[in-house]
Amino acid sequence: DGDVWAEVRVALIATLYARIVDPAALGPRLLAKLKPRDLARLRHRLGILTLWDPRRPEGPYRLTLSNADERLVAKTLFSISTGTNGGWVDAVFRPSETFAAADDWSSLYDLPYGAWSEPDPADMSDTRLPKAGTFCFVW
């Protein structure tokens, strides 16, 4: 069964990833070789901040904004994109985080996403980026 071998591959990579001496050099090359499903499993297992490099943010994203680490990645990408037209491609958002949700996705350009990088008046240490929802895009 492919799922069994996928789990073995991901477990092996997760174990070896911790032993990489220079993850900035080897990490992106290793991650580029993974199938999208294996990469998603590895991100779930190790955490997105372990694998993500803000200097090389290219790639597909599916961020759950109620997850603090994934929300931090989104906030960082919004701050990187300010003034540069961003790197958003095929960006969509929905308020639901469940896979079985029937609500429609909204294009990022149909939303007030420009305000998402601004400080939240209710909490100046945070931004107006929604605290929940699913945000998908390619950078």
Image (tube, grey):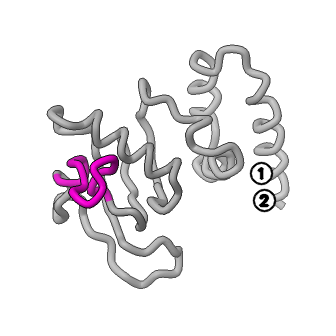
The one nearer the camera, 72 or 94, is 72
Mark 2 lies on residue: 3
Residue 101 image point, x, y percent: 46, 81
Q: Which image quadrant: the C terminus? A: top left
Q: Which mark is residue 92?
A: none
Q: What residue type is labelled 1?
A: Ala
x 53%, y 57%: residue: 67
x 48%, y 71%: residue: 97
Q: Is mark 2 on a helix, strand or loop?
A: helix
Mark 1 lies on residue: 6
Residue 35 image point, x, y percent: 62, 45
The answer to whether residue 86 is left or right of residue 6 is: left
Tally the marks: 2
Q: In this view, does 44 lie above or below 59?
A: below
Residue extending furthest bottom? Answer: 102
Badge 2 density bin: few <14, some 14–19, many ≥20, Cα 10 Å: few
Q: Which image quadrant: the N terminus? A: bottom right
Mark 1–mark 2 CB contact (< 8 Å): yes
Quadrant assignment, res 39 = top right
Q: How far apart are marks 1 and 2 (CA)?
A: 5 Å
Q: Is mark 1 on a helix, strand or loop?
A: helix
Q: In this view, does 51 lie above or below 42?
A: above
Residue 9 image point, x, y percent: 80, 43
Q: Which amino acid does label 2 sit on?
A: Asp
The answer to whether residue 34 is left or right of residue 18 is: left
The one nearer the camera, 31 or 97, is 97
x 28%, y 45%: residue: 88
Quadrant assignment, res 90 = bottom left
Residue 100 image point, x, y percent: 52, 81
Residue 25 is covered by the magenta coloring: no
Give the residues in magenta: 115-129
